[in-house]
Amino acid sequence: MNKAQQTKFESLYQQHVNALHRQGKAATTIDVYSRAVRRITAFFDLCPDRLTPNHFKAYFDSLVKSHSWSTVRIDRNGLQFFYKHVLNKQWDWIAIVKPPQKKVLPDILSVKEVERLINGTRELRYQTFILAVYSMGLRLGEALNLRINDIDSQRMKVHVHLGKGRKDRFVTLPQATLVALRKYWATHKNPTLPFPAGATPRARHSASTAMDRGGLQKSIRVIAKDCGIHKTITLHSLRHCYGAHLVEAGMHLRAIQHEMGHDSPKTTALYTQLTEVAHQDIVILINSLGNRLHLTLDGQV
């Protein structure tokens, strides 16, 4: 781009960021939607207001080959936001790119495997973080955003601020998790953060930010491999494990929905597909129904 185009791009880009803030988008959404505009601009070295449908087709042809469908979807949504709210244009995105709709059930660890994962973790900070995420069904961002004063040891509740959908909720704090949180906090004594960034206790004590999201995601994969767990596991998988294990324990789906902060009971009902207990209950009920039929079965062969 020449200087004039660069100046125009910077103006449009700032309008994009401002519009995202005005729409009340979450920080992560602002980050990825802004990145989508930067990426396509760099791809063509062209101010995005000059792009045509053919440019988009070429861009997404390349993106589909080099990135995941999740990234393709995010870039499509980010660019759609930019063209609608900044350029006041509409594009027929389905004709350009339409990521496939997949319904994939996540891998689930058994309680024993979760135990093995935590006990096999070498560092106390990772042990405590994994336990907190699993035992309270937290999303990664929710755990990283926790503050010391969110932990209420009197009521045995944790206040989760601005979870998915920018909603607050209270989750139950297990006694074992409280003990682990206190043990880890005693090693760094950060005044505000239960999971501060830093490679040493001294650095963690004065840290003003939480542990690195990317570093945690990489670590969980390494830890799982070291523990001999060959399932595809991320930190978010532990939240699914929590939901599935609550179903196995017999907790009512409505209570699980409340604990996990699901908007729809359909989301919570997913966990019934991930548990052997739920499957066994179905088999028992179906067989019970069949046993109520008084059959003679003496028809001709």
Image (spheres, rainbow, N blue to C red):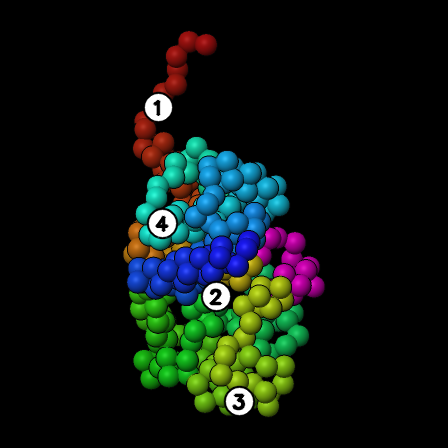
Q: Is 170 drawn above or below residue 106 in the view shown?
A: below
Q: Nearer the viewer, mark 4 or mark 1?
A: 4
| 10 Å crowding of disc 4: few (<14), some (14-19), many (20+) | some
Query: Of callouts 1 and 2, which one flags the residue occurring earlier in the amino acid sequence?
Result: 2
Q: Residue at horizontal 39%, vertical 15%?
A: 298
- Disc 3 marks which residue? 206
Report if residue 198 is visible in the image.
Answer: yes
Indicate whether 207 appears above or below 63: below
Mark 2 falls on what kind of element?
Answer: helix
Q: Residues within 10 Å of mark 1 (few under 14, many from 20)?
A: few
- Type of amino acid under label 3: Ser
Q: CA distance from mark 2 to mark 4?
A: 34 Å
**Highlighted range, magenta:** 220-233
Where disc 3 sits, the SS reads: helix
Q: Amino acid at mark 1?
A: Leu
Whole-Å distance between the Cαs marked 4 and 3? Answer: 44 Å
**Of the image marks 1 and 3, the number of the one nearer the N terminus:** 3
Looking at the image, which residue is at 41% across and 80% down? 147
| Marks 4 and 1 in Cβ contact (< 8 Å) | no
User: Which three-letter amino acid code belongs to the residue tagged 4?
Assistant: Leu
Is 209 situated above or below 90?
below
The residue that disc 1 covers is 295
Question: In front: 232, or 180?
Answer: 232
